[in-house]
Image (tube, rainbow, N blue to C red):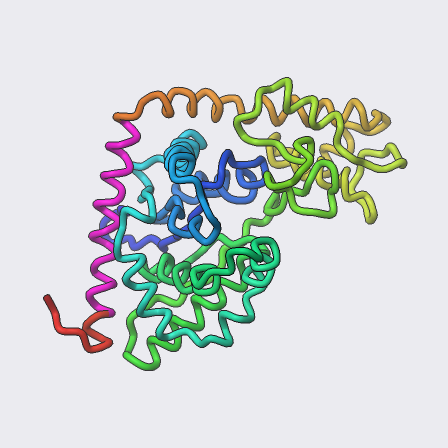
């Protein structure tokens, strides 16, 4: 992270798990905003590979997904010269601070986490301790870098609130140590819904492959999926109550074209849903074209990727260690 002389930029931290190719929802809700933020803030973006271990992983596949996730982040426009970009497991201070914070987090706080309840229900055969305590690791991710802001979706607000509570508790017990982070919520396009069930968030874990777009889908696949998108019987391209499918498509089209809702409604006035869905599909395919092209170039340049993530980890570790050593001193450990 860099800053101009005499100008302290606010620090933003965000991470994304390497759980396969990112969806259009991941892109619009997170990564597209990351690209804009790096112009205004000191940004730290990590591949949250340690978090992925709360469910069982195939080691070979996980390694491929971690590298692919790193390449996708860069392909989307994250510049490792502007933003601190690294893999979480390469910075050992995350795990070390997580233990300290676990000792400052109450059992009741962790037991109220809705994601723990949801994932326990989905993975009843593997309700491990990491699944229960990973909000403490998430708090460590944020607090290590003294982040001022954390981009959060609706499903992550609870985790950010826990991180805030832990930071405040630690500061009260040991003296001012951590910056208490605030949430950063994008104004538009923060939540992209499923194309087959627009009442649900778009997810690549959906059993229906037509419900989601991945950012590496081929143009013809993207257009085909949008043509199958669920709408309603009104056949009027306008935002409205009970029009979840059309509302979702208008939101997506607005984000990729930078057109307002009013402009979109006028553009497609008197035109049918079929025409509109095709237009959305083509606009998304064209918007994602540079991402696909950048990814193909990067994933075949292993030397560049290796140099980039090693440099990122080295810088991240230096920054994180300043916070960790401060914490160790505060809790009473003897300096090395």
Picture coordinates of residue 203, whole percent (x, y): 61, 42
Q: Is residue 29 left or right of residue 43?
A: right
Q: Residue furthest bottom?
A: 173
Picture coordinates of residue 290, whole percent (x, y): 48, 23
Instruction: Count up the numbered dots.
Output: 0
Q: Residue furthest right?
A: 233
Q: Is residue 258 left or right of residue 238?
A: left
Instruction: State the quadrant of the C terminus.
Output: bottom left
- Quadrant of residue 6 within the rendered picture: bottom left
Which residue is nearer to you in this view: 272 or 64? 64
Residue at image point 44% right, 48% down:
52
Please state the extent of the stretch shown in magenta in the rendering. Answer: 304-327
**Residue 77 visible to the viewer:** no
Residue at image point 27% right, 32% down:
306
In the rendered view, would you say 153 is above or below 68? below
Q: Is residue 240 left or right of residue 89?
A: right
Q: Is residue 44 left or right of residue 289?
A: left
């Amino acid at each position: 992270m860099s800053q101009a002389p005499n100008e302290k930029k606010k620090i933003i931290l965000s991470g994304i798990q390497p759980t396969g190719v990112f969806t259009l929802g991941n892109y619009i809700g997170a990564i597209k905003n990351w690209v804009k933020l790096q112009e205004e803030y000191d940004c730290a973006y990590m591949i949250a590979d340690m978090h992925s271990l709360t469910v069982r992983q195939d080691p070979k596949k996980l390694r491929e997904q971690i590298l692919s996730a790193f390449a996708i982040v860069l392909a989307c426009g994250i510049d490792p010269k502007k933003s601190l970009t690294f893999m979480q497991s390469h910075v050992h201070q995350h795990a070390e601070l997580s233990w300290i914070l676990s000792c400052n987090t109450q059992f009741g706080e962790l037991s109220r986490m809705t994601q723990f309840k949801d994932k326990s229900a989905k993975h009843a055969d593997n309700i491990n301790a990491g699944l229960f305590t990973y909000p403490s690791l998430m708090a460590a991710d944020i607090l290590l870098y003294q982040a001022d802001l954390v981009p959060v979706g609706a499903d992550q607000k609870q985790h950010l609130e826990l991180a805030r509570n832990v930071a405040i508790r630690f500061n009260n017990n040991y003296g001012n140590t951590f910056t208490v982070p605030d949430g950063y919520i994008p104004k538009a396009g923060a939540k992209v819904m499923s194309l087959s069930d627009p009442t649900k968030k778009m997810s690549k874990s959906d059993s229906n492959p037509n419900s989601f777009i991945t950012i590496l889908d081929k143009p013809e696949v993207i257009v085909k999926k949008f043509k199958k998108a669920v709408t309603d019987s009104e056949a009027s391209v306008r935002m409205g109550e009970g029009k979840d499918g059309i509302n979702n498509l208008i939101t997506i089209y607005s984000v990729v074209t930078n057109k307002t809702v009013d402009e979109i409604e006028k553009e497609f006035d008197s035109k049918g849903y079929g025409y509109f869905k095709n237009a959305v599909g083509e606009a998304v395919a064209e918007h994602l074209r540079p991402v696909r092209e950048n990814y193909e170039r990067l994933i075949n340049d292993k030397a560049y990727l290796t140099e980039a993530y090693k440099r990122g980890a080295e810088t991240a570790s230096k920054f994180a260690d300043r916070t960790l050593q401060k914490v160790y001193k505060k809790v009473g450990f003897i300096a090395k």
